[in-house]
Amino acid sequence: MESTGTSTAPEPGASLITGTPPITGTPLIAGAPDLVTVPTRQGLEAVDIIRRAAGQASQAGGVGPVLHDGSGSTLGFLVPPGTADAWDLPGSACTQTNGRGMRFGDTSPAAGATGWLLPPEAVGPVTDPEVLRAALGEAARLIEAADNCC
């Protein structure tokens, strides 16, 4: 997956992750969050890294809501609006949502559809982009080391 910096948002009513219906319900936060999409393996490692760091520091600032796609190939981290303007991390993409398709509340999506790995009501409002960038970098290094071991 290539880094794309900013990219266009989906059409009104379209899903944030291609091929799935929009998530509906109540708005999550004022101002539409952006979405950082990464391969699932790297994303799961990053979630663990952020949670461990937040737990050790005994502070807020852990991971926010995380989406998974129906195929299981990507995870999407909600980040503050405007993050896509400067996002340039290789292996990931950040999309401006402009609020299109961004309704929340249904935490039990149909099988095979986009759903929540970490739903909004279970975690903070969004993931800090710098924390996410560092965790994704560490996750990539861990995965590379594991894949090149032995």
Image (spheres, rainbow, N blue to C red):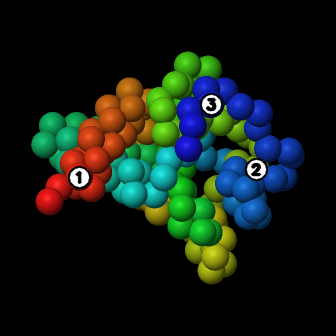
Cα separation between marks 3 and 2: 20 Å
> From the viewer's perspective, is residue 3 above or below residue 20?
above
Q: What element carries label 3?
A: loop
Residue under pointer 3 = 4
The first of marks 2 and 1 along the sequence is: 2
Cα separation between marks 2 and 1: 40 Å
Residue at the limit of the structure toward the right, as seen here: 12
Q: Is residue 1 visible in the rendered structure shown here?
A: yes
The first of marks 3 and 2 along the sequence is: 3
Q: Is mark 1 on a helix, strand or loop?
A: helix
Q: Which percent across, then down, holds residue 65?
A: 48, 51
Amino acid type, mark 1: Asn
Q: Please rate how many residues cluster around mark 1, counting C-alpha atoms within 10 Å: few if below 14, some from 14 to 19, many from 20.
A: few
Q: Nearer the viewer, mark 2 or mark 1?
A: 1
Quarter of the figure that contains the N terminus: top right
Residue visible at 65% across and 36% down? 95
